[in-house]
Image (cartoon, coloured by chain):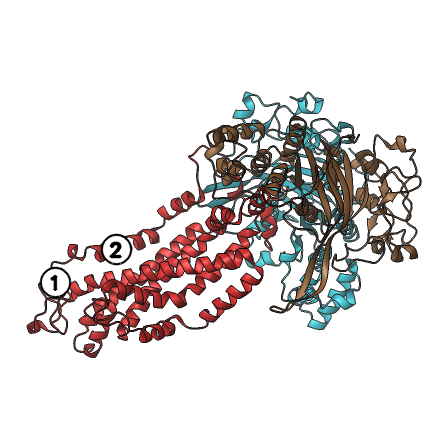
Chain colours: A cyan, B brown, C red
Amino acid sequence: MTLTETGSPAAVPAGTPPLLEVDNLHVEFRTREGVAKAVNGVSYAINAGETLAVLGESGSGKSVTAQAIMGILDTPPGFVTKGSIRYQGDDLLQMPEGVRRTYRGEHLAMIFQDALSSLNPVFSVGYQIAEMFRVHRGMSRSDGMKKALELMELVNIPAARERVKDYPHQFSGGMRQRIMIAMAIALDPEVLIADEPTTALDVTVQAQIMALLKELQRERDMGLILITHDLGVVADVADKIAVMYAGRIVERAPVYDIYARPAHPYTEGLLASIPRVDMKGQELFAIKGIPPSLMRIPPGCPFNPRCGYARDICREQDPPNYPVGDAHDSACHFWEEVVDGTRR
Amino acid sequence: MAPAGEAVLEVRDLVKHFPLTQGIVLQRQIGAVKAVDGVSLDLHKGETLGVVGESGCGKSTLAKLLMVLERPTAGQVKFNGEDIYSLKGKAFKAMRRNIQIVFQDPYSSLNPRMTVGDIVGEPFDIHPEVAPRRDRRRKVQELLEVVGLSPEHINRYPHQFSGGQRQRIGIARGLALRPDVIICDEPVSALDVSVQAQVINLFENLQSEFNLSYIFIAHDLSIVRHISDRVAVMYLGKIVEIGDESQIYGAPSHPYTQALLSAVPIPDPTQRDRKTQIVLQGDVPSPANPPSGCRFRTRCWKAQDICATEEPLLTIRPGISHPSACHFAEQAQIVETHDAEEFGLNQPVPTPDDDDLVEPGTLP
Amino acid sequence: MSDPTASAAGVTGTLEGHAGSPPTTAEPGREKPRSLGRDAWEDLRHNWVFWIASVLILILIVMAIAPGVFTSASPTASDLDVSRQGPGPGAPFGYDLQGRDVLARTIYGARASILVGIFATAFATIVGSFMGIVAGYYGGWTDTIVSRLTDVFFAIPIFLGAILVLTSFPSDENTSQVAAYTKVAVALAIFGWTSTARIMRSSVIQVKQADFVQAARALGASNSAIIRKHVLPNSLTPVIVVATISLGGYIGAEAGLSYLGIGLQPPVISWGIAISDAQTYLRVSPHMMMFPIAFLSITVLAFIMLGDAVREALDPKLR
């Protein structure tokens, strides 16, 4: 599989650690009802200029992993119980909070689905962007405001000069998301995590925001982790994909590979359930059942109760990551059958 | 494609303006949000009419009007020939039985303090003539089975179910009175991807089983395409284009429809560089203060002077197979479709000639 | 697909932040049908604050119904020989000015406090809920009128209002005990219903917008059926919490009114009257005041604790 895209993984010299590497991460939530195992051994890596899409449904652990990377997990109830998160080789989880804080904004930044509640309603947007420079760079307020204006122009906010003193509620959803992006890239982070950045937006606005993100990524050679449930958005922008289910990565692959040759029944099912033109009037393929409760993840492969390929071994043995192809692996005992397309 | 059956619902010039008022005691009107502004459409028996549009286009208000949860400012809706807004008393209540709704949010649409049996049985409490008291439990269990839930779950509470299952409970409630029309207001957009297909299939199966007519409101264009016979595209309170599924998706003629279709990401990475994307600038204007003339003109790359002065009517225009509300309507193929040749289309999307309005080119 | 609750999750972007909870409820399950009330009870059962408060309140209620269980001494038998005698054998709380047993009088005094508290809470809750539902559900002009009326009553402090009412309509020897309790309770409730009304109104407005209310309307349900089946059960939670906490407050207010001599009047036995009688001798015979005050504080505290525990159990945000 060759990636011809701009922003394809640059040839990283051997021995250089990836920009960001999550290794065997485990996160659990200790609630009154019991322990919910939200993330169970997630590993992925991202290099500069790369876009990694983390695909999953609600409860798959995709956002929790991102929160663990950023160090903004609500503790309690959330606890990282195992694993490491290495930024250029240094384990963020081993750092004291004071040191770790300096990484947020500076090296790692994140934008959220809900831009309105992510912005403080009592300060103007210009002031909030300027704060980033005041706090992290020790700039004066007026210099910060100048930088804020530059950033607002960079993210294509019309009439930015007049609007820099406006408050978040005076902007539309798409504009607010642009302001969030401006804040996130203010300090030139190397890694940007976008958690469902367009889910709350209309489809025409979604296209604008994704185009902006892509452009900024290319200009600044950022690593972009795009968390989403939308197979369409993934196909448009990602270089590689990690598919998550019940807190695990069930399949990892370069983007072209996964759409052409899914090797896990869950991925295959998701792709098959997309309404297609030539399927008009026919029943959609539907994955049966519902995602498991994170407090009672079934033994063996977590997907086995919903899986058409499942056999006894799937109920007993948690599948390892079987290599399927170049940079492509699947956590399914019967991945070969999936690839061959002998579904159900 | 569209069944030529009789119209069950005839919507004529429906208007809903929400007054904007100022003052607490002595309120005076300072304007109005024109949520729905002159919508006309027909719904035929056994048909699914998809309604698509972005937030603020008035599609949810349209649903509320059709359910008589809101009263219109003007216009009428005829159900089997009778204006539903002029019905009173018994006749009105009887009409209620025939039009039902399925809501978007499976969490807020079920009363958390009632059991599933009480929720699905509520329609029978309100319309006791439909089912004698002793039959109700059995009827509720039948309904649960019809929507794919275990009849044993009758005594459970909503919070014991997942989103998809709750949506099925909502559908069972909507079906209880054997309505002719079900308004589906974004019925799958709050569900997990892997569950959406199940619920879509259920809607389709129920339709053929009970000969239902659906108004299917959604923003997901691919789902609407899959389930709909005809599609209406709304923008700022008006229908800008309406036609068969194949006409709207295969040969859209209104610039807004074209932009909307081109913005939908295609779940196939090999299409990335091949498709032309029309990236619209700016946001939808406020429905309290819509642009003059054509409402889309502020974001349109084809806009001319006439668009600001003269409102384009929704009508069949020369060279176009279906009604479109654009002075410069032109059929074009935006997305890959099996019907493309049928319309003699192979020309690409008109290249936008005004760089200020449209960002030319594709996503990287 | 995005969970609808996620949009509210906010700055921390906890799309799955509370990952524990949604999937738990997603598993239709193995156990018996669990209503929300049952869940709340499960929660309360494991809360020690709830149990302490409940045991205290239970003891107080038994005291109010059958004071004889706790003491064999008569609260009215007076023996001036032991006037103001401190605690000692046979009288663990000592004697008051007229030589009556303080323990007996404190125990018999619970009835007045509890009854006035319950009456006042009941009146305030019923009136307040009614006003709140009317204002919240019907909205428009009805809401404007009811809300302004509420504001007018809200502007007058409860205690001051009760003093005004009770001095305008004083009790005398001919007033029966029950009438005396009722009068104090009504005097407190007249100005106490407003907070319930406000809470009920906002809670009704919130519930009214829920889709299940719209669904019932779409089915053709009448307003009264919608209020009864959908709106009331779902907006009662905060009112229950306020009622529990304010019950303690009313008990305190009753004591205050009686202390001022305008609430309950002797020969009714009440903590307030006892405190009032004892104040002159606070320095020489502190026991006369200490015990009624301790009982009063514990009672008020017990109800506030119960209210807090109930709120914690019913609050869906913590769930």
Q: Looking at the picture, how far across and down is residue C55, in whole percent?
A: 27, 53
**Distance from the alpha carbon under mark 1 to that under mark 2:** 19 Å
Identify the element where label 1 is drawn: loop
Task: Identify residue type, mark 1.
Answer: Ser
Is residue B23 visible in this depiction of the protein?
yes
Query: For residue A186, which quarter of the picture?
Result: bottom right
Asked if badge 1 and badge 2 are on a common chain, one would say: yes
Q: Residue at position x 85%, y 53% from top?
A: B294
Q: What subunit carries mark 1?
A: C
| Apparent side of residue A124 relative to residue B258 in the rendered image (left or right) | left
Q: Quadrant of the N terminus of chain B?
A: top right
Tell me which label, 1 or 2, sits earlier in the chain.
2
Q: Position of residue A253 (x, y in %)?
A: 70, 35
- Please report, as a chain letter, where disc 2 is located: C
Q: Is residue C261 above or below residue A30?
A: below
**Residue tagged by mark 1?**
C74
In the drawing, does residue C170 fall left or right of residue C216?
A: left
Residues packed near mark 2 inside 10 Å, few (<14), some (14 to 19) or many (20 plus): some
Q: Is residue C208 above or below residue C25?
A: below
The mark found on residue B246 in the picture is none
Badge number at residue C61: 2
Please name whichever residue, A92 or B255, is drawn nearer the observer in this view of the structure. B255
Q: For residue C299, what is the image quadrant?
A: bottom left
Would residue C20 be visible to someone looking at this image?
A: no
